[in-house]
Structure formats: C-alpha cells, structure tokens
Image (cartoon, rainbow, N blue to C red):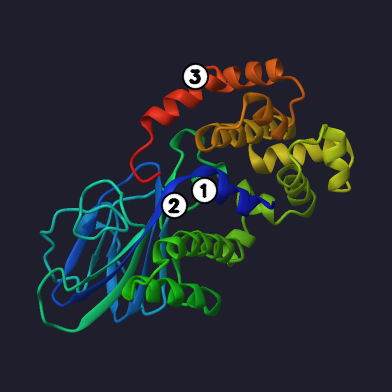
Amino acid sequence: MDVLSDVIAVTRTGVPRAARVQWHAPWGQRFASVPGAAGFQIVLRGSCWVLGESGPDSEPFQVQAGDVVFLPQGGAHTLVDDLATPVDTPPCAPGEPGDSGEPGGSAGTATVDPTGADGPATVVLCGAYRLDPARSHPLLRELPATIHLPARVELRAIVDLLSAELEHPRHGTDAAVSPLVDLLLLYILRAWFDSEPARNAVTGWAAALNDPPVAAALQAIHRNPTAPWTVASLAAEGSLSRAPFARRFTALVGQPPLTYLTWWRMTTAAARLRETDDPLRTVAAAVGYTSEFAFATAFKREFGTAPGRFRAVQRAAAPAGR
C-alpha cells in the first residue's frame, strides 16, 4: 500500500459518517469541535459562508457549488446562508446536522429543510471520519485546520455517487456509503498534496511526499513494513548514501527513518489488535517480528501496556456501530 492509502486504512476507526442536507434561507448551522475526527462540507447546490472556530469574529469565506471544505482536526465551524443571519441552533456532530450526539447507527442520512424556512435552497454534503486519537498520523496533524478546495472534476464523480445514495437510499446503501466516504477522503488528501501550497512546502509531510528520495523510502516502508529495513537499505530506495538520506528524512518527516518505521509498525499492530481476532503471533508477523516476545516488548514500550491487555481495553471501549 502507499502512504495515503495506509493513513486512511489504519488510522481511521469506526464507520465514516455522511449526511445530505437541504437548507432554505435564512439558515445557519453550528458544528461542534470533535477531537479525533476529520470532517468535510461540500456544497452541492447554492452557496454559503463558512465561519471558523472563533465564530462571527473569525475571517469568513464563501463556498460555491462543488467546493470542498475539509477540517482535518475536526475543528468547530459554522455554515450560514448570509453573514447577517443569526445562528442560534445547537451545535451538531459533523455528518449529522440536527443531532448533537455521537455518530452511530446508519452510515448516512438525508435531511430536508431542518429549519422549516422557505427561502432559496442550499444543499450540502456533510461528513466525518473517526480517527484513532492516540495514533493520529503526522501527515494529518500537519494539515491546515481548514482546507478550501475549489470545485474539481475528479472529486465531482464521487460526490455525485455519494449524494445519490443518501438522497435515494436503496438496498445496499449502507454498504456503499462507507467506501465512498473513504474514497472521497483519499481524493481530498490527494488534491491537497497536489496543490501549490503543498508542492512548495520546505518541511513536513507535504515536502516529504514531494521529495523523491524520502518519498521512495516512505513508499517502501508502507509497501512492505515487514521487511528487515535498515537506514542503508532505505537510503538505497531513494538512491542516496546513508548519512545524507538519514539527515534528509529526519528533517522532512520529523523522525529518523527507523523510528518512523517502528512507529508505523506499532500503529498497524494496534489497528489489527483492535479490529481482528488474529492471534498475537499473527499480528507480530504482520508487522515484521519473528518473535512474539520481541513484538510484545516493542508494543509495551510504545503503548505502555501489553498487546493482549490493549486489545481487551479497546474492545470494551468500542462504541456502537463499530
């Protein structure tokens, strides 16, 4: 797997949420901050304004049909039809307008006119992803708090499919919504990392993914995390000698190569322990450890608890709908 695919597959937990909502002016909706989540808002028809976490005093911006607003850290925000419209609705969870509770139940919903107004209509696709707060990937943590992507052809096809499933649910809709929301996240991230700000970054993950030697090493780690990687063998993936590669990788990624390798192996192991019933020896082998004892030692060093205990606690704490 490549880096972006892994970030989505391993760090996401539970079921992604989505809702298609039609508001009639005047309208406004607050969305609560949800730590450990990433959210998006996509205007399907009409337009609206986005207010940031500081409310009316923050710098607002307008979004048009096809525009995507992505909030990687799940920050609080407000959508409103006009800057003069007062907003007195209670905040809701991303992906569930009108419901301030935790995500649960069906993967997607469609709501028409929750305000009961009768002015010009705006249709918005809202969604949220639950991320593992203890293992949030630095690639996501380094993204801006709010990303505004103007309408893009490559996003529109997925948006149209997801919107149609939510507007007209049929047999299999729940099975279709989750992978479509995952695919949408992948395309949003890809669009951001292909954007001018990301391509011009000089440090961090945006720079790392646009740096051929470091990107090659990262792809090698994610493609085959069980390989007996060394700094020298990872440097060879990027066609650099050992010392220059190690300095370059550390400067861009923020961790030395083998430190990141261990972190990713343990993150992958945690996901397998949480989501499967695989024996510990199978989990150990899947992340590059031939010895179950060595794996358990490394896991406890990383998480402060044994793998079996970690699995039991995670299962006990898992919310409904997982």
Left or right for 9, reference 103:
right
Residue 40, horizontal then vertical, whole percent: 39, 61
State the SS at label 2.
loop
At x 55% / y 51%, what residue is drawn?
8
Name the disc covering residue 140, or none.
Answer: 1
Q: Amino acid at mark 3?
A: Arg
Residue 301, horizontal then vertical, whole percent: 59, 17
The 10 Å Cα crowd at callout 3, few under 14, some 14 to 19, many 20 or more, is: few
Left or right for 242, reference 266:
right
Q: Amino acid at mark 2?
A: Pro
**Residue carrying label 3:** 309
Q: Where 210 sits versus 203, above or below? A: below
Residue 272 seen: yes
Pair 3/1: label in front: 3
State the SS at label 1.
helix
State the SS at label 3.
helix
> How many badges with numbers are in the image?
3
The 10 Å Cα crowd at callout 2, few under 14, some 14 to 19, many 20 or more, is: many
Q: Which label's residue is closer to the chain start, 3 or 1?
A: 1
Could you say which is closer to the camera, residue 36 or residue 175? 175
Mark 1 in CB contact with mark 2 (< 8 angstroms):
yes
**Residue carrying label 2:** 72
At x 59% / y 63%, what residue is drawn?
190
